[in-house]
Image (spheres, rainbow, N blue to C red):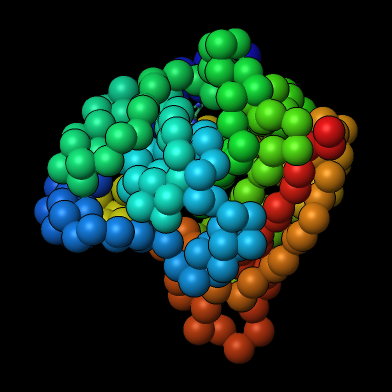
């Protein structure tokens, strides 16, 4: 399969998941975002955004899903906010949530690799969280997009699942057993659907997940002129998928944050 075919398959799979997640989350999200200044972010994220100084910054979120995180950044004082996602169904949800929250954020349905050129050098911060890099077949090209979206000196902030989690199989009986090589190059074909909140069973079309080593992520940043300023690993799960591992006495790294700036 070509990268474009993987991306198209993933678009279909995410659109299938959108109405399921809407039922599970929207009632609460509407209540939350009716409160002035609401954010769905945890303390780690809020701390890093404070260090970056999100207030007044123009922000792009890549793979923004239903927009709840970008709306949270808007509530922290971000200026222009644009969310990009390939799922038209999730983009519709993001627009609906923005309207309920009465927050001015733009949402655009697009493959990240095809974000239009007129957005180049438009942002002070590119923001990426939880379950994004694994949908990207090509990390080199992905960080080239990050680079072109940023103004000189602009920030990248990533808060993600740790790549080591790709070595486990969350559906296997012996959950904590290593099952896949850390150096695996072929994508994972996911046939069980993408409802990571409720594990709903439905006739899901196949989606494709790409493992990227920590060194690949770091090297792709460096190759694109992104100077890494911080990298931290944590033992808490950010995905809802690996919650059980938080309880284990001996655990792998479960999540990480990375900040970088585009060299002037
Ligand atoms: C796990 S979700 C992100 C969740 C989000 N961080 C949150 O917590 O609300 C991943 C998102 O990536 C989007 N996506 C996957 N491949 C993409 C691509 N090639 N271009 C743009 N968006 C993509 C999906 O549509 C989905 O909304």
Give 61 or 194, whichever is nearer the viewer. Answer: 61
The picture places residue 104, in percent across and down from the top left corner, at: 30, 35
Give 66 or 48, whichever is nearer the viewer. Answer: 48
Picture quarter with ligand 1: top left
* As drawn, 114 above or below 53: above
Quadrant of the frame with the C terminus: top right
The picture places residue 91, in percent across and down from the top left corner, at: 31, 29
Give 10 or 160, whichever is nearer the viewer. Answer: 160
Name the residue located 36 percent from the left edge and 60 percent from the top edge.
Answer: 40
Name the residue located 52 percent from the left edge and 78 percent from the top edge.
Answer: 246
- Is residue 191 visible in the rendered image? The answer is no
Name the residue located 60 percent from the left edge and 88 percent from the top edge.
Answer: 249
The picture places residue 20, in percent across and down from the top left corner, at: 21, 43
User: Quarter of the image holding residue 206?
Assistant: top left
User: Quarter of the image holding residue 136?
Assistant: top right
Given the current orientation, which residue lies at the most extreme front position?
56
């Amino acid at each position: 399969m070509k990268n474009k075919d993987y991306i198209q398959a993933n678009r279909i799979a995410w659109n299938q998941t959108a109405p399921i997640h809407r039922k599970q989350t929207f009632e609460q999200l509407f209540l939350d975002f009716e409160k002035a200044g609401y954010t769905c972010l945890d303390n780690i994220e809020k701390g890093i955004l404070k260090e970056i100084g999100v207030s007044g910054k123009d922000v792009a979120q890549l793979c923004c899903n239903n927009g709840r995180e970008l709306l949270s950044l808007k509530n922290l004082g971000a200026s222009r906010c644009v969310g990009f996602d390939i799922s038209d169904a999730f983009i519709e949800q993001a627009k609906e949530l923005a309207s309920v929250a009465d927050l001015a954020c733009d949402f655009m349905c697009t493959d990240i690799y095809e974000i239009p050129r007129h957005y180049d050098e438009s942002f002070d911060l590119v923001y990426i969280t939880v379950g994004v890099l694994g949908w990207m077949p090509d990390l080199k090209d992905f960080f080239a997009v990050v680079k072109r979206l940023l103004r000189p000196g602009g920030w990248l902030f990533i808060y993600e699942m740790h790549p080591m989690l790709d070595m486990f199989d969350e559906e296997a009986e012996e959950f904590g057993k290593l099952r896949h090589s850390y150096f695996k190059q072929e994508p994972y074909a996911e046939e069980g659907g993408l409802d990571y909140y409720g594990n709903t069973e439905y006739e899901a079309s196949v989606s494709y997940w790409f493992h990227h080593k920590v060194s690949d992520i770091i090297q792709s940043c460096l190759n694109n002129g992104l100077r890494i300023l911080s990298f931290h690993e944590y033992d808490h799960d950010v995905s809802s998928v690996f919650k059980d591992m938080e309880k284990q006495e001996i655990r792998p790294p479960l999540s990480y944050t990375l900040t970088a700036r585009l060299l002037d």
